Image (spheres, helix red, strand yellow):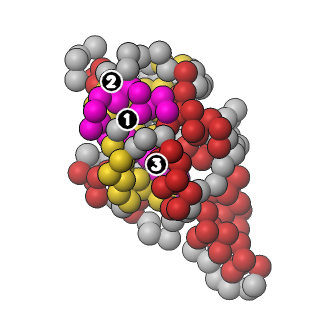
Amino acid sequence: MSERLLKKLELGCGINQTPGYLHNDINPFDGVDIVGNPWEIDLPDHSLEEVIALGLMEHLTYEQFSMTLDKVRRLLEPGGVFLFDVPDIPVWCRYVVDHFDGKQIQFSIDHVFCTLYGWQRWPGDEHKSGWYREKLDQALNEAGFTETQYGLQPFQDRSIARRRMSRPHDAHLYCQTRA
């Protein structure tokens, strides 16, 4: 494996791994390099320049989320980047209320509930935490991350794309923060 690959890690990659990264998941899907919980990854401290987690963090309890942030911060070299996304819970809750108030929403109500609670296709595919910007800021600050910014640009700059990223109504908080 190249030295460059050893510097980038994708947490919770599932079956859609991002090229150019080492891949972690709790399930031994094809292409997963490190099977296990993201907060238990056994790599040297300060050994990574970048960690991504797409569609993972909401699958963790608040305690697991915190432990994962602590692990990622230790794994990243100083100034290293952590990029992740989570559903924007206030928006998805508004979709539920709007649906039951008889308003038209962008998705089926089943899609909205799956975004809130997970798609439950395999073990670990349930959502265990919900996030909004202020709650994320607090968790990141407590873990010692700095220079947090929200938006798609850092993902686009790295050619990281998922279908939800092209649909603004598929409301997610896209976060980049530094160790």
Q: Quadrant of residue 98?
A: bottom right
Q: Earlier in the sequence, mark 1 or mark 2?
A: 2
Q: Is residue 72 magenta?
A: yes
Q: Nearer the viewer, residue 124 or 108?
A: 124
Instruction: From this view, report whether residue 50 is shown above or below residue 85.
Output: above
- Element at label 2: loop
Which label sits on residue 51? 1
Instruction: From this view, report whether residue 136 is shown above or below residue 19.
Output: below
Residue drawn at the location 49% of the way across and 37% of the way down:
69
Q: Nearer the viewer, residue 163 or 127?
A: 127
Which residue is identified by label 3? 141
| Dot 1 amino acid type | Val
- In the rendered structure, the answer to whether residue 128 lies left or right of residue 28 reads right
Label 1: few (<14), some or many (≥20) within 10 Å? many
- Element at label 1: strand
| Dot 3 amino acid type | Asn
Instruction: From this view, report whether residue 156 is shown above or below residue 10.
Output: below
Closer to the eye: label 3 or 1: 3
Label 2 near label 1: C-beta < 8 Å? no
Q: Quadrant of residue 50?
A: top left
| Dot 2 amino acid type | His
Q: Is residue 21 visible?
A: no
Q: Nearer the viewer, residue 23 or 104?
A: 23
In this picture, which residue range is highlighted in magenta?
70-87
- Measure how far apart labels 3 and 2 are at the Cα level: 19 Å
Which label sits on residue 46? 2
